[in-house]
Image: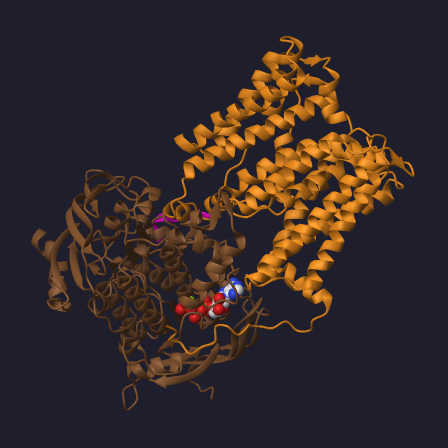
Chain colours: A orange, B brown
Amino acid sequence: MSTSGTTTTAPTGSPSGSSTANMLKKSLGGSLRQYGIIGALIVIVLLFQVLTDGKLLLPNNVASLVQQNAYVMILAIGMVIVIVAGHIDLSVGSVVAFIGGVVALLMKDMGLPWFLAVLAGIALGALVGAWQGYWVAYVGIPAFIVTLAGMLIFRGLAVIIVGVTVAGFPEGFVKISNGSLPNALGFVANRDVVTLVLGAVTIAALVLSQIRTRRTLLKHGLRTEPLGAMVAKLVIFSALIGGLTWILSGSRGGSPIVLLIVGALIIAYSFVMGRTVFGRHVYAIGGNLHAAILSGVNTRKVNFMIFVNMGVLAGIAAIVTTSRAGAAVAAAGMNYELDAIAACFIGGTAVTGGIGRISGAIIGALIMGVLNMGLSIMAVDPAWQQAIKGLVLLLAVAFDLVNKRRVGGR
Amino acid sequence: MSSQNTILEMRSITKTFPGVKALQDVTLEVSRGEVHAICGENGAGKSTLMNVLSGVYPHGSYEGDVLFEGEPCEFRNIRDSEHRGIVIIHQELALSPYLSIAENIFLGNEQQTRGVIDWNATNSEAAKLLARVGLDESPDTKIVDIGVGKQQLVEIAKALSKRVKLLILDEPTAALNDEDSAHLLDLIRSLKGHGITSIIISHKLNEIAAIADRTTVIRDGQTIETLDMRGATPVSEEQIIRAMVGRSLDHRFPERTPNIGAEVFRVEDWTVHHPIDTTRVVVDHANLHVRRGEIIGLAGLMGAGRTELAMSIFGRTYGAHISGRLIKDGKEIQTHSVGQAIRHGIAYATEDRKKYGLNLLSDIKRNITASALGKVARWGVMDASGESRIAGKFRTDMNIKAPSVDVITGTLSGGNQQKVVLSKWVFTDPDVLILDEPTRGIDVGAKYEIYTIINALADSGKAVIFISSELPELLGICDRIYALSTGRITGELTRAEANQESLMHLMTMEKEAVR
Ligand SMILES: Nc1ncnc2c1ncn2[C@@H]1O[C@H](COP(=O)(O)OP(=O)(O)OP(=O)(O)O)[C@@H](O)[C@H]1O
Ligand SMILES: [Mg+2]
């Protein structure tokens, strides 16, 4: 069938030199950005480590960093999906306050057991998401408007039901965000064994899954990244996870419970976005809506589900936040939407949709978190903290653009 | 070599993209006042060369020298090149749809006094320019309201407003019908009379033979030769093809003995109204049918309603107040959504691959599987390696020129993008495949490949509905051709009956009758 006499199989532009660094660079090619942002995270961590005289990475500080910023990560997961599909959600902060209030009242006034209240909170999140999803997907109102309305509606409802504060929750509920996994396996050299085991399992799972993917690719004769690059990548990631594990195992309680929740969400949603038909549809809608419609994607249903999902995650974030504070506050969740959106953009999500990854948003959230933590340890005025975070957002996206121009040649 | 007469010289231009050497040591020399054609297969590097020339790729991002009117040029962007009188009209038109013709012509170059737009000057200047390009429209008509042919003329008027010396047209007639194309070529000729030099990129070799003074052929990013079209012995199309593909093509259309079976699909009394102006009938009581193993053609001028007919059938993606019946394998079917249409074995490959066909941000493999994810997923979970394997097979079968299936489709050349679109729909394994201008902007070699693919699909028992504005192509490929004119099917001709004249007669029938 080939009528043109030109080569199609010969590899074009063979790489010059084959040092490991070169191979690494080449194999990372597309996701170079992703690694650039990890580098930025490491630089920021080291910077604050120096600026705070080594206080940033003290075990207890790392544990509370995780606990205090869990909400950004949870919301960023949902937000990245929303933004990839070409929407935005401005309401999540208000939704967090609203659901937090409802959950608190369910426990305090209705005397519901805390785990039932938690389930109710998540269900309510789904309902709120369905409400907003309906207007966006089926009526066709831009998400910016629907969620701007939602921002006002749910903040108003939160104030109405909560008043100012509702406090005094069962211990089980408070532990969600303040507790740690039980030190069931005791201590070795003053380190929590449960945490060490968890870290080891995570690293093992990472290595195994990478090896398995590589095997399948090889079996089918498909292109794989060079072995050296894969090993280098695994070493870097294992070192990062190992380091975090080591530090946390020395903290007061060991592994924070929220870390487990966030970790499970990250894994689950990375899978959803990377490996499922639903995830593929989200990218298709954001990449080219017309083409997605003409490819038979049920865009309404997908858009609806995206918002339902965002609602569920806002529900989880509400529970985590309320538990952390030990009280439902009408003003809770203020600016959370902005934190989540900023995390997505720092993590390389495209403003126009179509491009973005869960892992990127999580790293973006961590950068925001480290900034929060480091600046607080240094006792920087909150007003300045805000200004600095804004600047970081701007610089991160600028860096991204410049980088793209250099690599893309356009 | 650079004489008084040379307006442009590009010397040993080399341009690399990550993983691709798009241009290698390319040389181009254009004389003042000539029409210089550039030919080459899809992905040969024609558009890239013109992007280098016009500053889309800034100085420093390529190697080599550009000399315009004897002076070296170091353009940093399009504005720089426009200042020197080099204007490029891209493969994809770049007009703002909701602005008027006049506003578009002066976009970025507004007729103003201290920031305030002078509407009188804008409109009167625009009217003058429109007269020069022979476009009979009011300057305040919105771009959305005029057809592609006229939009192309607006682009040229815009170029003229910039005092163009060298006009570059990248596949200007790809989206035009014969009438509009002829008009455009006349215009280029008349511009030449006014001393404007043109570079024209086209895959339509008959046009090149008709208009070009010289032709430079590029293959795989290298200059092959420059042919003098006005020499003692006229250059034949075969000669150009040989230079383009490196060997001669014996036939333009592959041989095929049709093996036609029972009827698969029938459209009865199909009427479609315009989605916004719902009183306007766009498709008027259309009746047609197609049989297993048969290739039928839909011929018609721009606006005849061919795309509208196809899209309204395909999940009602166009139109309002649609009525009529669709019969598949003897049973009436409903296609209210694209998903439903695909499940009934209908596929539609759009004429506008960038806007409607592809996710340009995504890679080849994800685009190929996009319409049939179910075939590479189980319980909603993708089989990633299976997907790569399938896409890899399409890459080989369809001869998609890309180093791997992980290449982002936005960086592919037009022809290769088209092959990805085709692969995508072939992968859905349809019974009825509707192809809307599948060879638009595609080189001769690749066209032949695509015809071969279409033939193979028909031979495997599929019914193909082929929409094209190129009559020779319809005549060369189809077993039966329906002609449409202003929304009505005005006739049906078998392969034996059909020729350019009989088709043209049917395609223009209604128009004449109305007047
Ligand atoms: N931005 C880019 N990034 C990477 N590769 C690119 C980019 N632009 C073009 N290419 C590659 O450069 C080569 C030349 O492309 P170009 O668009 O110039 O081809 P062309 O001759 O105009 O083809 P067509 O006739 O299909 O329009 C192709 O292999 C294409 O994939
Ligand atoms: Mg091109």
Asked whether residue A27 is drawn in magenta, I would say: no
Q: Nearer the viewer, residue A118 or B102?
A: A118
Furthest residue in direction right, as rendered: A189
* Image position, residue A60 (x, y; %): 84, 33
Q: B421 left or right of B322?
A: right
Q: A98 left or right of A199?
A: left
Furthest residue in direction bottom, as rendered: B232
Residue B86 in view: no
Among the 4 quarters of the image, the one containing residue B301: bottom left
Give the residues drawn in magenta, as a range.
Answer: B115-122
Q: Nearer the viewer, residue B505 or B364?
A: B364
* Image position, residue B58 (x, y; %): 55, 66
Asked whether residue B120 is drawn in magenta, I would say: yes
Q: Nearer the viewer, residue B436 or B1?
A: B436
* Image position, residue B193 (x, y; %): 29, 75
Furthest residue in direction left, as rendered: B513
Compared to A204, does A306 lie above or below?
above
Compared to B490, does B325 lie above or below?
above
Among the 4 quarters of the image, the one containing residue B491: bottom left
Q: Residue at x 60, y 28 (%)?
A: A314
Compared to A153, does B188 lie above or below?
below
Q: A45 left or right of B424?
A: right
Q: Residue at x 39, y 30 (%)?
A: A139
Residue A206 in view: yes
Q: Residue at x 25, y 74 (%)?
A: B255
* Image position, residue B125 (x, y; %): 33, 57
Tell how many labels. 0
Compared to B97, does B59 lie above or below?
below
